[in-house]
Amino acid sequence: MTRRLAACAIMLLLAGCASAPTTYLTLAPVPGETVPGTGVVAVAPVQMPPALDRLRLTRAGGPEVIHVAPHTRWVAPLGGMIRRVLARDLAQRLPDAAVRMPGDPLPPGRLRLVRVNLLRFMPVTGSAVPAHVVLDADWEEATRRAGHRLVKGRTTQGRARWVVPAGAGGPAQAAAMSTALGRLADRIAATLGHLSRPAHRPAKRGPAAVERYGPRVVRPGGV
């Protein structure tokens, strides 16, 4: 009798585990402030540690503890999804620039390539602190010629870290991750817009200035 009860309990437990539904999550673009910016912009494949780039949602439970959700998954590989959402965020914030989506053909000529290295990007849960999402990233913008591997011209680098409050469930934490990614897009778009401004150059002395001030005279031994 005891064995039968134990067997029934095990079968009920297995049935309960098998019937647990899987929740599929995605990241979504978050609107931000628009800034002036020009040129062709593309986002390179995002770099991130393998511990973060998983199909299942991972949460940090402490400095040395990572929890992998058994029934909460990303609808697509996380690295590619972050790249697409970041590109859409930048396209909304830089309406005057030509932001290419992943997979779009790149035109010949100058290209402003954005590279992002995510050092940390996951929800943090635990009894000691409220649930939140941490985004810690290095990024750079480099001007190069489409089709060339060597970076040409100026390279701009940045480092950013945000902490965004999040709820307890997977959907709320995915929404907080989207918000953090939008803040990263704010920072990158502001830098791209600043670099798009024309450099200030001193005005040349025209005929009117020569007539008013006279020709410039260079004396021996001086300027």
Image (tube, grey):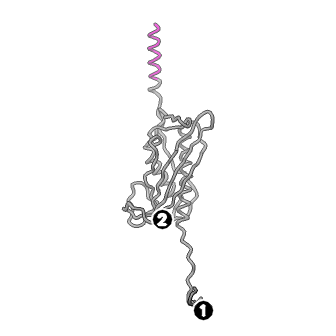
Q: Which residue is mark 1?
A: 214
Name the residue at 47% across, 57% down: 114
Q: Is residue 178 left or right of residue 148?
A: right
Q: Main secondary structure of the magenta part?
A: helix
Q: Is residue 189 above or below residue 78?
A: below
Q: Which residues are magenta?
A: 1-15
Q: Magenta stretch: residue 6 in it?
A: yes
Q: Which residue is mark 2?
A: 154
* Front one among 42 and 223: 223
Name the residue at 44% across, 14% down: 7
Q: Which sits earlier in the primary sequence, circle 1 or circle 2?
A: 2
Q: Amino acid at mark 1?
A: Gly
* Front one among 5 and 202: 202
Q: Quadrant of the C terminus?
A: bottom right
User: Residue 28: where, in percent of width, then height?
Assistant: 51, 48
User: Residue 210: where, in percent of width, then height?
Assistant: 58, 90
The extreme left residue here reads 147
Dot 2 crowding, Cα within 10 Å, few <14, some 14–19, many 20+:
few
Q: Is residue 12 above or below residue 72?
A: above
* Element carrying mark 1: loop
